[in-house]
Amino acid sequence: QVQLVESGGGSVQAGGSLRLSCAASVSTSCMGWFRQAPGKEREGVASIDRDGRPRYADSVLGRFTISQDNAKKSLFLQMISLKPEDSAMYYCATLAWVGYCSSANRPYSWGQGTQVNVSS
């Protein structure tokens, strides 16, 4: 079981920025960020494979950037131009490798989450 610990959440005003971090106990081939707002299903936000190839949900494309430091086994999510609808608990996860990396792939480890609140 891969251990994941997220950090960096907080409260910002619309238009602001936050950088989320996820520390992993081991490096993996595919990792992603997810979010879940109250009353809504968890959704994939972004994923990245070991070679640094990212994928993004349409709702965050151009505003969020996923990156990683394989040596430090860390995953990041830089978020800019935040909107109130970005408010949610954000989770990092390790994902199955199926020839490519996507947040649609089966997740097999989750962090405890970090809360992001964006006020209008």
Image: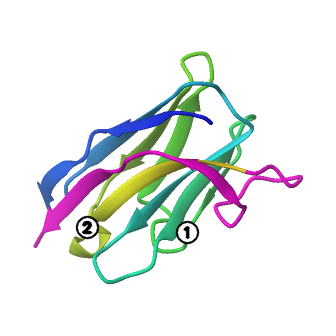
- Residue 28 vs residue 8: left or right? right
Q: Residue at the far top: name it.
A: 71
Task: Identify the amino acid type marked 2.
Answer: Ser
Across and down, in percent, residue 111 comes to: 45, 45
Write the start and end of the magenta stretch as one range: 96-120
Label 2, residues with CA under 10 Å away: few <14, some 14-19, many ≥20: many
Q: Main secondary structure of the magenta part?
A: loop
Q: Which mark is residue 87?
A: 2
- Residue 117 vs residue 109: left or right? left
Q: Secondary structure at mark 1?
A: loop
Question: How much space separates mark 2 and mark 1, taking CA atoms?
Answer: 15 Å
Q: Is residue 56 above or below residue 9?
A: below
Q: Secondary structure at mark 2?
A: loop
Q: Measuring 70% from the left and 34% from the top, which residue is drawn there?
A: 28
Q: Is residue 111 magenta?
A: yes
Task: Identify the amino acid type marked 1.
Answer: Ala
Q: Quadrant of residue 102?
A: bottom right
Quadrant holding the N terminus: top right
Render colour scheme: rainbow
The one nearer the camera, 63 or 66, is 66
Quadrant holding the C terminus: bottom left
